[in-house]
Image: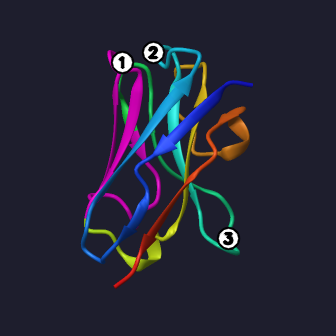
Amino acid sequence: QLQLVESGGGLVQPGGSLRLSCAPSGFTLRNYVIAWFRQAPGKEREGVSCINPSSGSVTYPESVKGRFTVSRDNAKNTAYLQMNSLKPEDTAVYYCAARQTYACSGVANDYANWGQGTQVTVSS
């Protein structure tokens, strides 16, 4: 199992923005699909967005389309989730996950490699 490290979470007011980063520990992301998930208290882990090695991306819940953007910088060996126009319902622990394949998936069980998560709280 490979390790990933998320950063960039925090407390932000509604309407604000955050950029989460996901960096691997000891391997390169170049040939991996990277996905972002989130889990709010009492809810199941939800796929948010995914990007494949060619930077083709998928965004899953309608609630974040147009507001969240996934990207990757292979030169920096880092993936990102840019979150704009944040809402209180976006409050959750956000995780990145990786799998060595070409196809994106928004299903948590399809990923064996996870980060520890970063808390995002949207509140006034």
Task: Label 1, secondary structure: give it.
Answer: loop
State left or right for residue 102 relative to residue 123: right
For image coordinates 30% across by 76% down, the residue present is 13
In this view of the protein, which residue sits in the foreground, 101 or 39? 39
Please tell me whether mark 3 or mark 1 is closer to you in this view.
Answer: 1
Q: CA distance from mark 3 to mark 1?
A: 32 Å
Residue 54 percent coordinates (x, y): 37, 19
Task: Label 2, secondary structure: give it.
Answer: loop
Q: Picture quarter containing residue 56?
A: top left
Q: Amino acid at mark 1?
A: Asn
Specify how the rendered protein is coloured. rainbow
Task: Label 3, secondary structure: give it.
Answer: loop
For image coordinates 60% across by 19% down, the residue present is 100
For image coordinates 48% across by 71% down, the residue present is 91
Packing grade of label 1 (10 A; few <14, some 14-19, many >=20) is some
User: Where are the magenta residues, as a range?
Assistant: 58-84
Dot label at residue 85: none
Q: Is residue 98 above or below residue 117?
A: above
Q: Is residue 59 above or below residue 14?
A: above
Q: Which residue is mark 3?
A: 43
Dot label at residue 74: 1
Q: Earlier in the sequence, mark 3 or mark 2?
A: 2
* Magenta stretch: includes residue 120: no
For image coordinates 51% across by 42% down, the residue present is 6
Instruction: Determine if residue 62 is in view.
Output: no
In this view of the protein, which residue sits in the foreground, 123 or 111? 123
Q: Which residue is mark 2?
A: 30
Q: Picture quarter containing residue 92?
A: bottom right
Q: Earlier in the sequence, mark 3 or mark 1?
A: 3
